[in-house]
Image (spheres, rainbow, N blue to C red):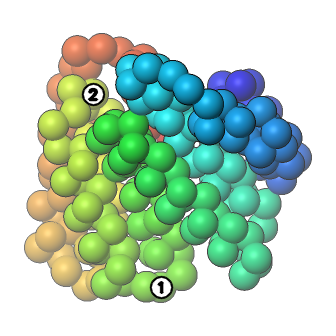
Amino acid sequence: MVTALGDAAAELGGGHARHLAVRYLTEDVAPWLNGRYTEATGRELFAATSQLVHLAGWMAQDEGDTPENRGRAQQYYAHAYRLAAEAGDPELSATALRGMAVQAIDLGHRAEAVQLGEACVRHGRHLENPRAVAYYEATLANAAAQDGDRRAATRHLALSESAIGRPSAHPGDSWAAHRGR
C-alpha cells in the first residue's frame, strides 16, 4: 500500500492521495497495531506503519504551504519517528528526522534544522546503503549552510559526495533511497 499510495502521490501530487493514506492508517492499520503478534512481526508492522505515516507527512507538505499542512506534516513526521523507534529501524528513524529537518529549513528555524540534521545523520551513520547516507549528509549540509556554518556545510557535503560514490551492498533495499522524500 505504501508503494501504491507513494506512486499515486508522485504522479498526481500528495494532496490527491493523502486522504486515502490516512483512511488506510486509521481504519485498517491502527487495529493491527493494537492486535497480538510476535516481536518480529511487530517490528515489521511498526516499520511499515512508519513508512506510511511518513508518506502521509510528505503528502501533507505537498498539499500546500499553509500552517495547517505544515502542522499536519510535522505531526506525521514525529509519529513516523516514534513508530520507527518502536520498530528499532535506524533508517526509518533517520528519514523521519530528515523530514522534520527539511521542514525546519523551509520555515527558517535554522538551529533546530541543524539539530534535527545531526540526529538524522547519527541514526543513519551505520547504514549499508550509501544513497541513504548521502541523503542524510546532504540534509545536514543544507541545514548548516542555512545556519551560516560554511565549514560544517562543506564537510557534510563532502561526506554526502563520498557516500554517493560508493557502491551499494543492497541496491533497492532502502526506504530513503527509494522514496526520495
Please, is residue 92 above or below residue 48 in the view?
below
- Identified at 30% across, 56% down, the residue is 120
Q: Measured from the top left, where is residue 46 in percent x and y?
A: 50, 36
Taking depth in this image into account, of 42 and 1 the one nearest to the observer is 42
Side of 18 where 106 appears, left or right: left
User: The residue tagged with tag 2: helix, strand or loop?
Assistant: loop
Residue 129: numbered disc: 2
Please, is residue 10 above or below residue 122 in the view?
above
| Category of crowding for the residue at label 2, using alpha-carbon neighbours closer than 10 angstroms: few (below 14), some (14–19), many (at least 20) | many
Amino acid type, residue under disc 2 in the picture = Asn
Side of 125 where 93 appears, left or right: right
Q: Measured from the top left, where is residue 76 in percent x and y?
A: 61, 58
Q: Can residue 21 be seen in this view?
A: no
Q: Mark 1 points at which residue?
A: 108
Please, is residue 36 above or below residue 62 in the view?
above
- Identified at 64% across, 53% down, the residue is 58
Side of 41 where 3 appears, left or right: right
- Identified at 58% across, 68% down, the residue is 74
Side of 144 where 67 appears, left or right: right
- Identified at 24% across, 49% down, the residue is 123
Taking depth in this image into account, of 156 and 127 the one nearest to the observer is 127
| Category of crowding for the residue at label 1, using alpha-carbon neighbours closer than 10 angstroms: few (below 14), some (14–19), many (at least 20) | some
Residue 17's quadrant in the figure? top right
Residue at far top of view: 170
Amino acid type, residue under disc 1 in the picture = Gly
Residue 168's quadrant in the figure? top left
